[in-house]
Amino acid sequence: MTLSRFATKNAFRNRRRSFITAISIAFSLLLLTLLMSVYRGFYIDQGPPESALRLVTRHKVSLVFWLPSYYREKVRTIPGVVHVSPWNWFGGIYKDTKPENAFAQFGVDPNEIFDVIKEDRVPPDELEAFKRDRAGAAVNRALAEKHGWKVGDKVIVKGTIYPINLEVTIRAIYDSDNAFDSMFFSTEYIDQALPRVKGRTGTLYTLVDSPEHVTSVSKAIDEMFANSPQPTKTETEKGFTLSFVAQLGNVKLFILSICGAVVFAILLVSANTMAMTIRERTREVAVLKTLGFTRRTILSLYIGEAMTISLFGGLLGATGATLLMIIASKMPNGTFFTGFKVNTPTYLVALAVAALVGFVSAFFPSYSASQRNIVDGLRHIG
Amino acid sequence: MPQAAEMKSAPAATKLVQANHVSKIFTRDTFEVRALDDVSIEIAEKEFLALMGPSGSGKTTLLNMIAAIDRPTAGELLVQGENVFRYSDKKIAEWRNRHIGYIFQTFNLIPVLTAFENVELPLLLTKLNKNERRDHVMTALTLVGLGDRVHHLPKQLSGGQEQRVAIARAIVTDPTLLLADEPTGDLDSHSAAEVLEIMKRLNEEFGKTVVMVTHDPNAAAYAHTTRHLEKGMLLPG
């Protein structure tokens, strides 16, 4: 036996209590891991390297206002700009409004969109077919597989923003690391069906040649149109995504507040258990001291015991969150967690939080027990 | 724990414990309790001393002071010629681990540990390796007649067996001094006799100095010397 083995045995001495404490910690850590993954996905992860090179330009006031299509060619003249494509949200309904049938549709320039989104991989012959057919569409493989679409299939999407229905033919199926289901079709389709919207675009997607030029190009675009009737706001792809999140309010503060509350709650649960455990063993502490255990060893033993329980709960919770995220990402209709994942740093942070909770919750009762007079401890009846 | 032959070669008898005018005063709220009042006693090496007296007479307090788990309010207490109370708490703990074997009335075994692990506990604080620890534990358990109960948990043992495990735990570090506080208080007469026989053997065969607190005259009969305490004072021997 070793002292660590002794601590482990003590940790599960009262199995029911230790198990309930570990489960409480596991549930809290599961929630914490999920929240940290969402936070990381929103505010820390930069996505693929190509994403950092993409800029999204929209109307400065709001997305609901259009930009003139000719902005695209003006943006192209800015040094550092490699490719520019229009990007129009269609917002149509496929079959019905059931979540499993929901996916995004964007009007783009088939000739340039896959140069802007370089990480998406399209077979060359299918890309050529997509470029040639004004009524063609490109869909990601997961979406095609979900609906059983093959190249050549016709798909009808009912317009909600535009008073037209899209009747497109699948010309290309591309592979994407992005978890979101999307359909691309040519903006010309809408331009021809609705002449009144011709010459307008919702947003422009711009690919910049190097990370060093991203800021200067972004600034140059906005300065270029600063005094025009349609001033622009240009931000990175990540920033653009976060602007949607920001519409919900201060999500960052909200997530951090819940994380803080979760940690505080598990700290109380664990501290209560440890205080109870150590109080019950007052006499035993005195016996150990009589055998020659120092205060420091006693302190280490109890802290080790608490950390064993909290790390066990942390492992359960963090692993549970990882599995949940994997299951969520594979669900056919997608969930809130689609696109997020528990990565190694988040997992390790969750375990570190669990260890810290164990340490902090046990420190004060353990310290108090280690300082207690042996004679008083031996007299303790409990 | 050294082998039996090694243990027999104890040094020549000298004064192992010397208490000079030791007093202990406990303060409870606004009044004081004089647990020990100017006690002077000498305990020689290899002695088997029984301390008797009514409840509250200061027997356990004196025993605790010898084990350095309680400090005298006045007077001087030397063990092996040293005033251990001058040491730091850490050093006192180490000293206790090396020199004192303490046997409680209520055994105080750790319920989640087997007999083997309970006996091994004090050795975890030493530099012995796993094999050496195992040899010491097995020697101690065999000596108390429990070599075949090593993997039993305390709840699987009788009271007498539990106390024998506690004795094995007390002797496993080969201490100089064995202190027993009412070791037979929770045992039936048969188990009590077994425990007392073991203690007598430890004293006679292995040269251990034993100080035993007891109420029981039959238990005290195993000792060489019996001293009585009353109201904190040591009666003339």
Image: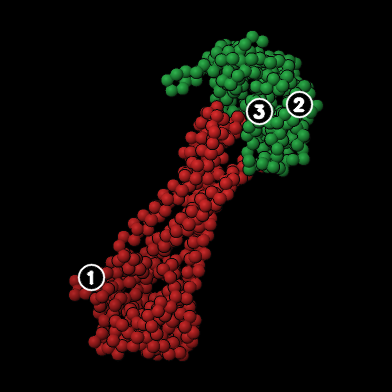
Give the colouring mode of the picture.
by chain
User: Which of the two labelled residues, at mark 2 and mark 3, occupies the earlier sequence position?
Assistant: 3
B46 left or right of A92?
right
Residue A294 location in percent, x, y?
57, 32
Spatial distance from mark 2 to mark 3, Cα to Cα? 15 Å
Q: Nearer the viewer, mark 2 or mark 1?
A: 2
Residue A313 location in percent, x, y?
52, 53
Q: Residue at x 65, y 22 (%)?
A: B215
Q: Residue at x 54, y 21 (%)?
A: B71
Spatial distance from mark 1 to mark 3, Cα to Cα? 88 Å
Foreground: A326 or B75?
B75
Q: Residue beneath label 2, please?
A: B197
Residue A193 visible from this viewpoint: yes
Q: Counting other residues with Cα less than 10 Å from the Cα at mark 1, is it few (<14), some (14-19), or many (20 or more)?
A: few
Judging from the image, what is the letter of the chain drawn in green? B
Q: Chain of mark 2?
A: B
Choose top left, top right, bottom left or bottom right for residue A112.
Answer: bottom left
Choose top left, top right, bottom left or bottom right for residue B51.
Answer: top right
Q: Residue beneath label 1, please?
A: A61
The kind of secondary structure element at disc 3 is loop
The kind of secondary structure element at disc 1 is loop
Spatial distance from mark 2 to mark 1, Cα to Cα? 96 Å
Judging from the image, what is the letter of the chain drawn in red? A
Label placed on residue B185:
3
The kind of secondary structure element at disc 2 is helix
> Which amino acid type is shown beneath numbered disc 3?
Gly
Q: Residue at x 31, y 88 (%)?
A: A164
Residue B102 location in percent, x, y?
65, 27
